Image: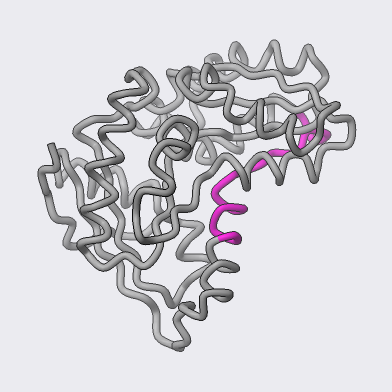
Amino acid sequence: MEELIRQLPHEDIIFLADTARVPYGSRSADEIIKINQEIIPFLIKQGAKLIIMACGTSSAIAYPVVKDDYPVEIINLIDPGAQAAVSVSRSGRIGLIATVATVNSEAYQNKIKKFKPDAVVFAVGCPLFVPLVENGQIDNDETKTVAKEYLKPLIKEKIDTLILGCTHYPHLVKVIKEIVGPNVALVNPAEAAVAETKQWLKQAKTLRNSNTPGKHVYYVTGSEPQFTEIGSRLLGRPIVGAKQISLS
């Protein structure tokens, strides 16, 4: 959401937080696909002209299955994230941290190989990062200890690029940078995905031409107060008027 607001400040944004069913990383592929088959029609019904599948796990598992099933363009995180990593990597030794489901899907690994056949990808599942971020443990000793353990094998492989393959992970950039050092480029797939979104809207001539800020509507499937508190803290601005809904 932060990247959307930065790159597309005049667009109206409908944000759906499926907090009742996260984390997705431990769910089966069938469950993840079904969840997206519930979310996408809801967003279309709200008037979405384009959908960003702003979840690494959904992008890895559901996107290939559902991408052609709906009348709006769907942008995933894998393609732009992999392309960005290949573009900045000097040695072709690329690290990936993501949910276990994303790592096991090999979506990033396969896409990187498609863009750069001689690239070598080293991937680590990081299941503890999401709860640490959501509990506000962004820069404490526990988070640093966990991050060191996750990143140790990637540093050992002498990666020069690291993909932050889950939308929660950019909140840990400070800690991750301290551990991997200045010679490892960090890639946030959200930046590339929103840039791709902007380009697509321009080509489709549906990019909003206005000098006024876009409207932001928030839906949540779990606790609205909890989402508002955590979301406002992570976004760095107050979330107002979030509406609780049921999809399942």
Residue at 52% x, 65% y: name it.
6
Q: Position of residue 24 (x, y in %)?
A: 34, 27
Count of number-bearing discs: 0
Region of the chain picked out in magenta, as a range: 181-196
The answer to which image quadrant residue 223 occupies is: top left
Residue at 45% x, 65% y: name it.
5
| 104 and 18: which is toward the camera | 104
Q: Position of residue 119 (x, y in %)?
A: 81, 27
Residue at 47% x, 86% y: name it.
209
Residue at 42% x, 47% y: name it.
53
Q: Is residue 186 magenta?
A: yes
Q: Position of residue 127 (x, y in %)?
A: 44, 18
| Quadrant housing the C terminus | top left
Judged left or right of residue 183, residue 43 is left
In the image, residue 176 sits, relative to residue 202, either above or below, namely: above
Q: Is residue 198 magenta?
A: no
The answer to which image quadrant residue 32 occupies is: top left
The answer to which image quadrant residue 145 occupies is: top right
Instruction: Name the image colouring.
Output: one colour
Judged left or right of residue 163, residue 130 is left
| Quadrant housing the N terminus | bottom left
Q: Residue furthest right?
A: 91
Judged left or right of residue 170, residue 219 is left
In the image, residue 24 sits, relative to residue 210, either above or below, namely: above
| 14 and 75: which is toward the camera | 75
Q: Position of residue 220 (x, y in %)?
A: 20, 47
